[in-house]
Image: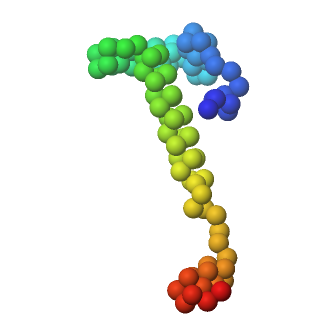
Amino acid sequence: MSVNYISRQLTEEEFFKLVFEKGKSLSSEKKARSGVNNLEYFTQDKYKKSRFVVLKDLKEDLDKTQIQIWEASHTKHDVLVDPLETFTFKYTLDNSVS
């Protein structure tokens, strides 16, 4: 599954620039940088992996889960059966009448 609702992906520096420009605030940019750094510290400490690897793994897992959900919701048991046809077949088997 692609991220087709995002027209293009930003680099970190482009992201920080947009954060700054939105509020014209160096404080906002610093908070955004701090959040990204905290995510990196967390993923390194908890998983011994960079934030990029953890986020990529999460996306792949989400994609697999969405495929499994789609497949489970489109199984053969979703086919509708005519109730009269089912009754006739059952009656024929139970009563040996053709």
Query: Where does the C terminus fall, quadrant-wise?
Result: bottom right
- Residue that protrudes farthest toward the top in the picture: 13
Query: Where does the N terminus fall, quadrant-wise?
Result: top right
Q: Is residue 63 visible?
A: yes
Residue 68 placement (x, y as % from top left): 52, 43
Residue at figure coordinates x 53%, y 51% from the top left: 72
Horizontal side of residue 26 vs 50, given as left or right: right
The correct choice, above or below, for 23 with respect to 75 in the image is above
Q: Which of the pair 10/83 is nearer the observer?
A: 83
Residue at figure coordinates x 66%, y 80% from the top left: 85
Q: Which of the pair 17/98 is nearer the observer?
A: 98
Residue 21 placement (x, y as % from top left): 62, 17
Q: Which of the pair 87/1 is nearer the observer?
A: 87
Residue at figure coordinates x 47%, y 16% from the top left: 52
Q: Is residue 91 visible?
A: no
Residue 80 placement (x, y as % from top left): 65, 68
Residue at figure coordinates x 40%, y 13% from the top left: 50
Horizontal side of residue 33 vs 73, given as left or right: left
Q: Which of the pair 47/88 is nearer the observer?
A: 88
How is the rendered protein coloured? rainbow
- Residue that protrudes farthest toward the right in the picture: 7
Residue 37 placement (x, y as % from top left): 40, 14
